[in-house]
Amino acid sequence: MEIISEWGTVFIVLAVIFGFYMTWGIGANDVANAMGTSVGSGAISVKQAIVIAAIFEFAGAFIAGGQVTATIRKGIIDPSAITGQPELLVYGMLAALLAAAIWLMVASSRGWPVSTTHTIVGAIVGFAMAGIGIDAVQWAKIGTIVASWLVSPLLGGTIALLLMLSIRKLIINADRPFEQAKKWGPVYVFLVGFIVALVTLFKGLKHLKLELTGTESFISAVVVGVIVAIIGRMMINKVRVDTTADRDFHYASVEKAFTPLMIFTACAMAFAHGSNDVANGIGPLAAVVSIVESGGQVGQKASLPIWILVLGGAGIVIGLATMGYKVMQTIGTKITELTPTRGYCATLAAATTVVLASKTGLPVSTTHIAVGAVMGVGLARGIGALDLRVLGNIVVSWIVTLPAGGIMAALFFFVLKGIFG
């Protein structure tokens, strides 16, 4: 307790610096994954992706980022073993943030789309095993997270494949594809607004003092979906048939009609990602602030100050703007060839999976979901449409992530313990 009172301000300053560094890494890697499909399909430019992320990642983190944070903060380790030594948890959370941030920086510089969820979970488990003991790790919770690593790409890929098949049946294989694209486009835009609004409202926006019943949430989501669909129809109606482009590629005008839809799905994915993955950076930061401000209380329920959500949102946006382009290239152009229709299916499928996971409070990997969704639209054209060598490299980088985060976190834990202990 004496260490907490003596060094409390230093701990908070370090937590803010390391937390910002970690959210910068999330922006450079995970947000780049989230926006890669939109950029790779040619629907939006890298600059437009940064602007969309700046608005909607921040909004997702601020409006709907509170629930997953609790899972990262309290669910992975059992703090009761160190109730009398709260400083150990502070060292551990600081070590986990720094270790995860460094690994994300290395991976982003190489263009590897790794999982920030893997990274921070591995780092927290690494510190817990080294600093407290193997029994302190909530292995059942780790088991559900590991299961989500398999379920999330499968779910994302399945939804993407089904969406792609529906577009093929309703639009691409129809007699007049361009007219069908204009007819069905608003329906697909409605899905984007409805799904993201519904799950966000179902989560309950407690820190904004806004809680609706199930019926109220459903009606509100329908209203949001209709508004988005009306805006989408106005944008789609401005698209004209390009006969020259159609001569080279029969469905060029159909793809042009889907470009406005990609803008909506990019916004939805950014919002969904901000609501889910901001937790990876600010969960440990919130834990440190909570322990210091309570004078060393570990077990009590911690509130999530708004300024921490703001810090997380800002770090994510800056990370994407400064180093996100390398991972965007990997996810957007190297796994399979993307067009606006394929990119729409992959992005909406990924956004849907992320917000569903966010509702349950399970910290799934956005990276796995995004890669799974891109694979799903690629499989709609057969296994030959996928670059299996690139996918193999991605899987290897995922495997390396857990031990890299854990080993570094354990080392940093002992360094911090040596400095302050």
Image (cartoon, rainbow, N blue to C red):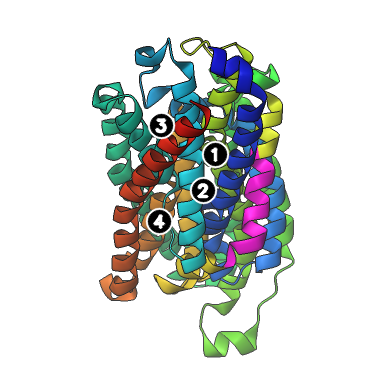
Percent of width and height locating residue 107? 45, 60
72 sits left or right of 162 in the view: right
Say which amino acid is labelled 4: Ala
2 vs 1, front mark:
2
Instruction: State which tag comes first along the sequence, 2 or 3.
Output: 2
- Residue 101: which disc? 2
Q: Is residue 316 magenta?
A: yes
- In this rendering, is residue 317 above or below 279? below
Residue 169, located in which quarter of the rendered image?
A: bottom left
Reading the image, the residue beneath label 4 is 373
Q: Mark 1 packing: few (<14 Cα in 10 Å), some, or many (20+)?
A: many
Q: Are marks 2 and 1 in contact (CB under 8 Å)?
A: no
**In what element is the residue under mark 4?**
helix
* Residue depicted at x 50% and y 40%: 97
Above or below, 118 relative to 413: below
128 drawn magenta: no
Measure the C-alpha gap from mark 2 to mark 1: 9 Å
Q: Nearer the viewer, mark 4 or mark 1?
A: 1
Between marks 1 and 3, how big is the CA–CA gap?
Answer: 15 Å
Residue behind mark 3: 362
Q: How many neighbours does mark 3 have within 10 angstroms: few (below 14), some (14-19), or many (20 or more)?
A: many
The amino acid on which the numbered mark 1 sits, given as a three-letter code, is Gly
Q: Whole-Å distance between the Cαs marked 2 and 3? A: 21 Å
Quick one: label 2, few (<14), some, or many (20+) residues within 10 Å? many
Q: Position of residue 356 (x, y in %)?
A: 45, 35
Give the Cα separation between the discs numbered 4 and 1.
24 Å
Q: Is residue 49 visible?
A: yes
Lower position in the chain sequence, tag 2 or tag 4: 2
For label 1, the residue is 281
Name the N-terminal-most of marks 4 and 1: 1
The answer to whether one can see residue 195 in this image is no
